[in-house]
Image: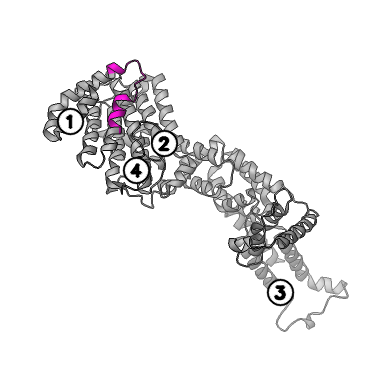
């Protein structure tokens, strides 16, 4: 009896010091077989503890003389406890979340969420995330087979069904070419067999409650604002795991958008830290170290960024932030003077500055990875439009004669400089690379796969907004217009990209031809050009300068 009490006391002590998330994890892992094993072991221990008493009153109990040599009721108790402990430990170690435990898992997740125990919640999710989405997707052999055999889904395409059966049997899948060679009578035979199998499968109803519980967790918890906020602040890389696992989830796009917005709200999140730590450039391309897990996930293969529309929450947040500052200009710190603290520290906690930098990394990756898509670099014009709308020079410490006197000015230059790099990248890639092939010199959105041309249209729109702004200083306007003019001269310099130069010149002069202030805009363009003309004639080809002047006049 002392041994039994000692074991029970030990179990209670272990449970008392076990972290709560581990206790919850055990509740999810333990199954009916485990309870049955523990119950049988407990009964056996009690019987052995009182073996002499029971043998005296139960005639069919074997005498101790019949036991194997050296084995007694007392040491048999040790043996049973040891064996059951090893069996349960092994089962709990390798047990996973199952359909039968899904409702328990959901209840635990909801309990932790409503109590605000996010650390325990995230630990529990991290352990069972893979199986959670497996249940969500009904990714089990019987359920897949049932779906394949369903007459509503069966259309005579037998290859997928045969491969499913082969995989369950441990056989290699059938090749597509082999499936095409099936004779019609074989196909018909398989249809008959599948129809019979469907009738047999229907005799075993499927409980949809586990899938519904999984949907409740994904839809009700993963998209909850408090959950997303805590996730972005404390376990952001768990968010990446959720995105990876949820490929077939209807809520995936919503989760990505809401999760990225939460990362942007916290200006000390991993998003800002990784962009700041990702400034190493070699031959025009950013190096993406594996330590920057967020950027690597989205940009190592830019198809992932395109599929998940990563640019949308970032671009939308930048525009929303500018709109908010328009409504509350008294809290707008971007109109302050540029100091060392902003350059070294504050800029890397600015949604605008870091957002512009992220687009630079993403678009350049798209160029180098031969992505035939502009990656929504067209977010730059509305961002620039919002900046110049908020731009002011009324801070007493601002010096208007400076080239970029305010923090807004620094961000404007960074945006224009990035777009210049995207345009001039045409010089660094093979002429036949798909995303730099120019099909037409017309200024239109018909070539969305051509990143340099899309960048030309974006930068000329941005230049229009800057030159028409009332509060942007003349020095800043001249500098940005000069930057665009120099792109034209750089494209003409080699003689290989005259078509791109023509697109740029046409876009600069005609991009906003429908605007009522077009004459004023053209006049300002010409004034900037004439101011810098002498410098151009010294450093640039005279014929190129004359050609551009003729287009501006």
Query: Which is more foreground, mark 4 or mark 2?
Result: 4
Is residue 395 in view from this perspective?
no
Position in image of residue 322 (x %, y %): 39, 25
Disc 4 from disc 3: Cα separation: 79 Å
Looking at the magenta stretch, what is its main secondary structure?
A: helix
* Residues tagged 3 and 2 counted as in contact (Cβ below 8 A): no
Q: Is residue 393 left or right of residue 250?
A: left
Q: Which residue matches tag 2?
A: 376
The residue shown at (68%, 73%) is 79
User: Is residue 505 located in the magenta-colored stretch of the structure?
Assistant: yes
Disc 1 from disc 3: Cα separation: 100 Å
Position in image of residue 31 (x %, y %): 69, 57
The residue shown at (71%, 46%) is 209
Q: Which residue matches tag 4?
A: 436
- The numbered mark, 3 or 2, whose residue comes first in the sequence reads 3
Mark 1 element type = helix
Q: Is residue 170 left or right of residue 357?
A: right
Q: Find residue 24 and name its label.
A: none
Q: Residues within 10 Å of mark 3 (few under 14, many from 20)?
A: some
* Residues tagged 4 and 2 counted as in contact (Cβ below 8 A): no
Q: Is residue 312 left or right of residue 546?
A: right
Query: Which is more foreground, mark 4 or mark 3?
Result: 4
Q: Quadrant of residue 189?
A: bottom right
Span shown in magenta: 503-520
Q: Find residue 545 and name its label.
A: 1
- The numbered mark, 4 or 2, whose residue comes first in the sequence reads 2
């Amino acid at each position: 009896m002392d041994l039994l009490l000692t074991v029970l006391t030990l179990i209670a002590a272990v449970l008392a010091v076990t972290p709560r998330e581990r206790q919850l994890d055990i509740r999810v892992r333990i199954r009916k077989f485990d309870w049955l094993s523990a119950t049988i072991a407990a009964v056996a221990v009690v019987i052995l503890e009182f073996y002499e008493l029971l043998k005296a009153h139960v005639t069919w109990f074997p005498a101790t003389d019949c036991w194997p040599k050296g084995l007694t009721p007392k040491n048999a108790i040790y043996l049973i406890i040891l064996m059951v402990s090893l069996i349960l430990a092994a089962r709990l170690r390798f047990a996973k979340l199952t359909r039968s435990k899904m409702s328990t898992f959901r209840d635990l997740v909801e309990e932790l969420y409503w109590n605000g125990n996010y650390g325990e919640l995230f630990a529990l999710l991290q352990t069972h995330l893979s199986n959670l989405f497996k249940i969500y997707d009904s990714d089990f052999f019987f359920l897949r087979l049932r779906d394949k055999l369903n007459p509503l889904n069966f259309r005579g395409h037998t290859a997928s069904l045969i491969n499913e059966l082969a995989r369950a049997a441990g056989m290699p899948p059938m090749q597509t070419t082999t499936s095409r060679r099936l004779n019609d009578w074989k196909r018909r035979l398989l249809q008959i067999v599948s129809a019979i199998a469907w009738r047999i499968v229907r005799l075993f109803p499927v409980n949809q409650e586990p899938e519904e519980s999984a949907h409740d967790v994904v839809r009700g918890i993963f998209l909850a604002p408090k959950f997303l906020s805590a996730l972005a602040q404390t376990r952001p890389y768990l968010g990446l795991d959720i995105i990876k696992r949820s490929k077939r989830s209807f809520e995936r796009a919503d989760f990505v958008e809401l999760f990225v917005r939460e990362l942007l709200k916290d200006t000390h999140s991993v998003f800002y830290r990784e962009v700041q730590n990702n400034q190493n450039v070699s031959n025009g391309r950013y190096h993406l170290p594996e330590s920057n897990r967020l950027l690597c996930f989205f940009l190592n293969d830019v198809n992932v960024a395109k599929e998940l529309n990563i640019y949308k929450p970032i671009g939308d947040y930048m525009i929303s932030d500018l709109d908010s500052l328009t409504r509350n200009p008294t809290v707008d710190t971007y109109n302050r003077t540029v100091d060392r603290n902003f350059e070294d520290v504050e800029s890397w906690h600015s949604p605008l500055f870091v957002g512009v930098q992220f687009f630079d990394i993403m678009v350049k990756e798209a160029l180098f990875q031969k992505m035939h898509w502009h990656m929504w670099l067209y977010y730059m014009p509305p961002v620039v439009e919002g900046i110049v709308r908020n731009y002011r020079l009324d801070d007493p410490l601002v010096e208007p004669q400076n080239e970029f006197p305010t923090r807004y000015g620094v961000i404007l230059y960074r945006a224009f400089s990035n777009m210049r790099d995207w345009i001039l990248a045409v010089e660094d890639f093979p002429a036949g690379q798909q995303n730099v092939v120019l099909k037409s010199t017309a200024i239109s959105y018909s070539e969305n796969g051509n990143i340099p041309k899309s960048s030309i249209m974006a930068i000329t729109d941005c230049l229009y907004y800057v030159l028409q702004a009332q509060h942007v200083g003349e020095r800043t306007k001249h500098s940005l217009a000069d930057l665009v003019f120099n792109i034209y001269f750089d494209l003409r310099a080699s003689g290989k990209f005259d078509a791109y130069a023509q697109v740029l010149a046409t876009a600069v002069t005609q991009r906003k031809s429908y605007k009522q202030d077009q004459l004023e805009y053209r006049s300002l363009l010409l004034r900037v050009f004439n101011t810098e003309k002498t410098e151009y004639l010294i450093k640039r080809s005279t014929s190129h300068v004359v050609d551009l002047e003729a287009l501006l006049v």
